[in-house]
Amino acid sequence: GHPLFRDMTTTIFEKMSMRARELGAINLGQGFPDGPGPHEVLEAAADALLTKSNQYPPMAGLPELRSAIAAHYARHQGLDLIPEEVIVTSGATEALAASLMALVGPGDEVLVLAPLYDAYVPLIERAGGVAKVITLTPPEWRITEDALKAAASERTRLILLNNPTNPTAVVMRDGELALLARFCAARDLIAICDEVWEHVTFDGIGHRPLMAFPGMRERTVKIGSAGKIFSVTGWKVGWMCAAPALAALLGRAHQFLTFTTAPNLQWAVAEGLGKPAEWFAQMRADYQESRDRLAEGLEAAGYVVQPSAATWFLSIDLPASGIDMDDVTFCERIVEEAGVAAIPVSAFYPNGTVTSLVRLCFSKADGVIDAAVDRLARFR
Ligand code: PMP
Ligand code: GLN
């Protein structure tokens, strides 16, 4: 095929979801909840569809949503954003694309940490940049100053981070965030921080935005997604927040990517973000229960799983479970023979590297988790 197609293959999430549909397998691969989403938020979207304008909203987003996002981050994360520093996008994916289109020039180097979300490297490369991959390894996935220094050069302009992290389900420690902040400030780097999982943290662990660390307020692009906060992944309402000089550039890129996002969904998200703290705590508690259900079920069946401090995911450790297969082989076998779709963690590494982990999604009804566990127990 054309050389341009080589690095833009079909994403693993779509591939595994297609396999699951073909084979009638339980899909614990691609990350999405199987519930309908919170009724009041859905109702707000339905109401807005019928009672508000369905024409192009303002390019940077409905003013009401931009204000709601700024107020939400003031309340939950102690940030001091003003609405003008918030740009609404069509999902976090568009926010990633817009940030990279806006901020990466030809030959600019962008530091990324693997395992990484699969959109990052193709987007950096299409923006004309060069991805410099720092490889993190289980079980600690620790970021060190030495690794940052070794990957950086005179041409490094940006670092692109995901915290809390998909697929490792870790929340970065304060010490790591402080290190990243010092590193960015010392090298005059911009940080694009993909924080779509900011509300989905467990065991009382809170999220700390990189933007709040010393020296980062003016050099961070903070990305969020309503799909994760409200369990409606199909909505594709996201946003990017940054100081005015950066936000102006981000807006220019956004105007030529999607320009805007469905207005009724923007109204509904604005309303949802105003929910009381208990609402978010309940959402976390519900997913934590699902996490425990899947982890305990798998452990009872003889699988060893990695801890999950955040996201909708946990990973089976194959060698620790006494399974002598790489992750891709295991995923192929369980989708065919057990009827359960999962994601090989090697798909999150540009160069393979870690092939011992298989990611499963637990944002599912109890019965679905139990059925998947039964099938995986019988597969052993
Ligand atoms: N970044 C990460 C780390 C994600 O896990 C996801 C979705 N799973 C996205 C970005 C994309 O978010 P959205 O659906 O809002 O585009
Ligand atoms: N982010 C989701 C996941 O990690 C998938 C999103 C997608 O399919 N692009 O499963």
Image (cartoon, grey):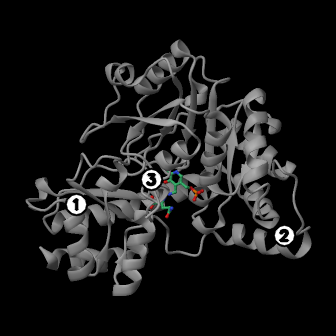
Q: Quadrant of ligand 1?
A: bottom right
Q: Is 344 left, or right, of 106 in this rendering?
A: left
Q: Which circle marks residue 48 in the picture?
A: 2
Q: Secondary structure at mark 1?
A: helix
> N-terminal of the two: label 3 or label 1?
3
In this rendered view, identify the residue nearer to me: 31 or 20.
20
Distance Cα–Cα, label 3 vs label 1 = 17 Å
Please tell me which residue is depicted at 15% across the width and 77% down the height of the picture. 379
Distance Cα–Cα, label 2 vs label 1 = 45 Å
Q: Is residue 197 above or below residue 51?
A: above
In this rendered view, identify the residue nearer to me: 42 or 237.
237
Residue, disc 1 = 327
Q: Is mark 3 within 8 Å of ligand 2?
A: yes
Q: From the image, which quarter does the C terminus lie in? A: bottom left
Residue 367 visible in image: no
Q: Please identify the quarter of the rendering in which residue 205 is found.
A: top left
Outermost residue, top side: 186
Total number of numbered labels? 3
Q: Please identify the quarter of the rendering in which residue 215 is found.
A: top right
Q: Is 46 left, or right, of 142 in this rendering?
A: right
Residue, disc 3 = 118
The residue carrying pointer 2 sits among few (fewer than 14), some (14 to 19) or many (20 or more) residues within 10 Å by Cα, namely some
